[in-house]
Amino acid sequence: MEKREVKERIAKLKTEINHHRYLYHVLDKPEISDSAWDSLKHELAELEGKFSEFITPDSPTQRVGGQPLPSFNKVGHKVPMLSLEDVFNAEEFEDWLARISKIAPQNKLSFFGELKIDGFAVSLVYQKGVLSTGSTRGDGRVGEDVTENLKTIEAIPLSLRQPQTSEIKSIGLDPAKVGKIVDLGELEVRGEVFMTKAAFEKINQEQKRMGLAEYANPRNTAAGSIRQLDPAVAAKRNLSFLAYDLVTDLGQTDHAQEHLVLGWLGFKTDKYAQELKDKKSVSDFWDKIKEKRNKLAWEIDGLVISVNKNKIYTQLGVAGKAPRGAVAFKFPGQESTTCVKDIIIQVGRTGVLTPVAALEPVDIGGATVTRATLHNEDEIKRLDVRAGDTVIVQRAGDVIPDVVKVLINLRPKNSRLFVFPKNCPVCGGEVKRSAGEAAYKCINKKCPARHREGLYHFVSKKGFNIVGLGSEIVDKLVDNGLVKNPADFFKLEPKNLLELEGFAEISANKLVESVKKSKKVSLARFIYALGIIHIGEETANLLAMYFGNLKGLMSAGEDELQKVPGIGDKAAQSIKIWFENKDNKRLIAELLSCQIIIQSPPKISKKLAGKTFVLTGTLESLSRDDAKEKIRLMGGDVSSSVSKETDYVVAGENPGSKLGKAQSLGVKIISEKEFLRMAE
Ligand SMILES: [Zn+2]
C-alpha cells in the first residue's frame, strides 16, 4: 500500500470501528461480533504501528495507551460541579417544592426525572470535537485529571458525533451555532461512571478464583478504578458511562433538550429519563422506577428530579454546595442494623449446608426481616460474624437478605467464634467440601433433611405445582408416615388426611382434588421436580425441548446430553448419574404407575433447517433476539455478517451496510413480512 492509501485506510477503519463501538456500547445494538470488531482494531493497530505519523488522539487504539502516572494533575471546573440535596420521602419532597415555589410559582413548574445511578460523577471536555480532558468532581471547584482512565471506557466517545441539522432544528436550536461549537469550540458534558451489576459480579468471581479479597460494591469499585494511576487497571474493569448534563450553552432551554442533544452527540443517556409535568407525575415515576430498581442492570439509589426549564433552574440559584433547582429523591434504604440471635445451619435438598443468621426482627424498606443468609463457611470467616453481634443487613428485591458487615465495636465481651459443624446437624452424617467448592454437603443420601427438602421441591410452584401443599403440610404427611417418596402424594385419599390434625372433610377433599389436577404435567416441570443436581428451571426446559419425551432423556448417554444447547458437562454427568440410580429408576416407575400424564413440548417445525440468516435494521414486530430465537428454534442459523454462505438477509427499517453487501454478493434480501411468512 502506498502511504496515501494507508492514510485513507486508517481513516476508514477509525470511522468503522467507532461506528460499531457506538452501536454496541451506546445503543446496545451490535451489528458485528466482538471478534470481528477486535480484528478491525487489530488491523488499525498494525497500520498505526508502521506509520505512527497517522496516529490521532481520538484513534480507537489510543484508549489504552497511557503510561502509569506519578500523580494526578489538578483541573479547575469552569462551572462548579455541585452535589445534590437528598430528600428521603414524599413529605421532604413537598418541603422542597414549597421552598422553590416561593421563587417560582408551582403552576409554571415542570420537572425532569432521571435515575440516580450509584456511580462516580465526572466531567468531560471536548476541544474541536475531540476528548481533551476528563476529570473527577473533587471538591466541586477543582478535581483530578483522570483523562487516561476515562478514555478506556468504550461508552465515552473520543470524538463527538455531529448532530443532524433536522434534529437540531426539531427542538428549535440553530444548526450553524451548534455545528460550530461541536466542530471548533469547547464543549463540556457531565455524567456518571459506573459498573454494571454483571461486570461487578464477574470481577469478584475473578478475585475469588485468584484467592484475593472480593470488592464490596460496584460504586466503590468504579470510583477506585478511575482513581488508579495506571490506566491498564481501569481498562480491565469494564466500566460504563451515562451522560446527564450538557454544560455548554448550545441554545438549549430545558433539561429534556440536553438529554436529546447528548444522545445526538454520541453519548449514552438514561433511557428512562423523562419530562414530568407535575407533582403527580413525579410520584408516579418514582413508584414505577422503585418497582424496577432491582431488575436494572446497574445500581441506583433514587431519582434526580430537576426543574426542567433552565431559566428557572438558574434563577433558583445555589444554597451552600447544592443547586436549589434539583434534588436527589432517594428510595427507602435497603440496609438496616440488627442483632444476630443465633447462627443456624440449614440442610438443603442437594445436601448443601447453608448457615443462616436468625435475627432480631427488623424492618427494612417496608418488610420485616428475621433471617439473613450467611452463604457458607468462607463468608462467616470473612465477616467473622458471631451470635450476639450487631450487624448491617441488606435486602435487595426478592432475594434472601444478607449480612454485609459486623459492627465489631458493638460486640459483647463473651462472644465466641462460630465453628462450622463437622457433621450434618440433621442426620449426624459426614459432611464434605469438594475441591473448588465453597459449600459443605451432607453426603448421606438418606438424610431426612435432604429428603424432606426434595419433597418440598417436588410439589413446589415450578415443579408439580400442587396448590395447597405447602411445607407445613408436607411435614405433617412425612411425620405421620403418609408420604415417604414423591409418588406417595398421588396415593393420598381424603380418609388418610382426616387422620391428621387440622384437616376436615372439605379441606381433605380439596387437597386430594388439587393433587389429582397436578397429574397432568409438562415434561419440563416433571424434569425440574425430580430435583436433579444442577438442573434448574431453565435447564429442565432445554432438556424437554431437545428430547421431547422422558424416554429419550432417560436413555441419553453423556455425549448426547452434552450436545443439548445450554447443558454443560456437570449437568450432563449429573443427569446420567441420577437416571442410573436404582432407587430413582424405581421412583420413576412408581410415578408413572400413578397415571401421571407427561405432556411433551409442542412440536416446532424445522422449516428453516440448513438456512443461514443475517438480520439488519430495526424489525417492526420482533426484537432482534426474538427473531434470532425463532430462526434457531426452527433449525436455522443466524450469522452477524453477510457472506456467500448467507441464504437470506432480513432487512428491517434503516438497514445498515449489510444490505449493500448482500446486494453486491447477490444474496436474497427479504422484508420482515416475508420472513414471518416463511417462519409461520
Ligand atoms: Zn444429613
Image (cartoon, rainbow, N blue to C red):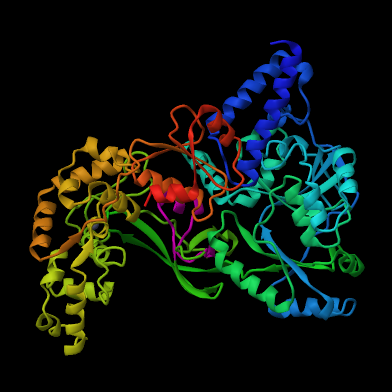
Where residue 589 appears, as percent x and y from the top left, is 9, 57
Res. 309 visible in picture: yes
Q: In this rendering, is residue 616 above or below 399?
A: above
Would residue 215 appear left or right of 82 to someone viewing this image?
left
Residue nearest the viewer, comparing 120 with 21 = 21
Question: Which residues make up the magenta segment?
Answer: 372-396
Find residue 448 and report its horizontal and vertical position in percent. 20, 62
Residue found 10% across the figure and 66% down from its top:
594
At horizontal 86% and vertical 44% (from top left) the residue drawn is 179
Apparent side of residue 665 relative to residue 645 in the rendered image (left or right): right
Quadrant where the image shows the N terminus: top right
50 over 500 or under it: above or below: above
Q: Quadrant of ligand 1?
A: bottom left
Residue 52 location (% of width, % of height): 75, 17
Q: Return the residue nearer the eye: 292 or 451.
A: 292
Q: Is residue 16 left or right of residue 464?
A: right
Number of disc labels: 0
325 falls in the magenta region: no
Q: State the image quarter where residue 433 is shown.
A: top left
Which is nearer the eye, 280 or 317? 280
